[in-house]
Amino acid sequence: MSEAAIELSGLGRRYGRQYVLREINLEMTAGRLALLGGSNGAGKTTLLRVLATRLRPSRGRGRVFGFDLVTGAHEVRRRVAFLSVFGGSYPTLTAAENLMLAARLYGLRGAEVTGLLATVGLEAVADKLVRTFSSGMKKRLALARLMLADAPLWLLDEPYASLDEDGKALIDRLLIEARGAGRTVLLASHETARCAPLVDALLTLEGGGLRAVPREVERV
Amino acid sequence: MSSQGPFADLGFVAAVARKDLLQELRSRAVTVATLFFSSITLMVLAFAVGRESALMQQAGPGALWVALAFAGVISAAQSYQSDLAEAAYEQLLIYPIPRATIYLGKLIANWLTMLALGLVLLPIGSVLFALPLTPGLPLLVATVALGTLGFALIATFYAALTANLQARESLLPVLMFPVVVPILLAAVRSTDAVTRLGNAALAGDWLQLLAGFDLVYLVVCTAIFHFVVDE
């Protein structure tokens, strides 16, 4: 039987008194790719942030590769790479400095920063401050950080946002490569038509729960 | 996946501190604001005290630490603001590193910034308040080092607590100043003992108290930092 990458049972998350996620049940097998859809405010980003251990669940339980999201948060973080919609880079550092910082914080020695920047098309601006970058360039830098992490689970929040067609094609390639490398990918995106052929399952968040699923527990 | 351990943790602390110092070196946002603000504060207080030598020397240590304290609040708040701009703080909290290493890294950066400011303010305060610096200079430097460390320990901790709040600018001083009062009192007394009284033994006693406070705050803040940043 294949290992479960994500197991969520009755998971909920609230901000103040308002529940954004109410009753999430999900079991996702390692090595599969799933698209997380839903309207604005449906809770897609919140779910990804909970899985990345940035937010604690308000109720229910969740495990990533067998590690509890709360009690095993540090182990979860060693297995997860999160692509934020905001980029997550430091404006007053250069692209190369941002990536070298990430390498140090991932505990990687001698990481091939230049090669990664070339992969995402930022080699020529490696020594430019990120504050001079467009939002698309910042997203490309975030993609380089994602690849650097070499994590078995990728959580991607609107990966296509801000990117030109060349950048979107880069995301497509990364998803195909992720499948080949056996990674598990959960991506939140409104680009359903583009993503659908690349993923194994389509999930929809609606009213704080996972909808358009055939059973109480979705098996991907 | 990389192996991790105590030496790796030290590397994480150094990486976070280096990142914060490099950002400050580039933007100079804290340096300019705190130097300008604390210099003006010292000048206003010196003007208010008048030209009577004894009174000036009595008020000098307090004025120096008031200026440093207000500057320290600005410094600590800014160290998180620069992270929040592009959600880099969120990314920092997702890296597979112990929460304490983030605190210690930011602490080192804040402390070095405050220490540098304190060492610049010493001669300014000396001129404005007629404080003799040279006889007990090593003790005075030790006082600034331990006082600013204690202040940075508290300020870095509470700045993290308020980083995601809308009213963070007003909440940060309200929350941290009651806790930091023992540090400020000990630092003022030690400075006074060195500059006005010329009593090295008394300054030593206050320095021991400062070191004790610093140690307690270091252990407590490091141990409970993860409660502050986990939402």
Image: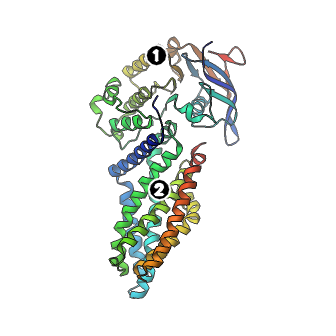
Chain letter for the residue marked with disc 2 in the picture: B
- Does the image show residue A17? yes
Which amino acid type is marked by label 1? Ala
Q: Nearer the viewer, mark 1 or mark 2?
A: 1
**Residue A189 at what x, y percent from top left?**
53, 23
Q: In which quarter of the image is residue A202?
A: top right
Chain letter for the residue marked with disc 1 in the picture: A
The answer to whether residue B80 is above or below residue A220 is: below
Nearest the camera: A19 or A68?
A68
**Residue B52 at what x, y percent from top left?**
40, 88
**Residue A197 at what x, y percent from top left?**
51, 11
**Residue A191 at what x, y percent from top left?**
51, 20
Which amino acid type is marked by label 2? Ala
Residue receiving disc 1: A181
For the point 48% across and 39% down, the residue is B5
Nearest the camera: A214 or A176?
A176
- Looking at the rendered structure, which numbered label has been put on residue A189? none
User: Answer yes or no: do the residues labelled 1 and 2 have beta carbons within 8 Å?
Assistant: no
Residue receiving disc 2: B76
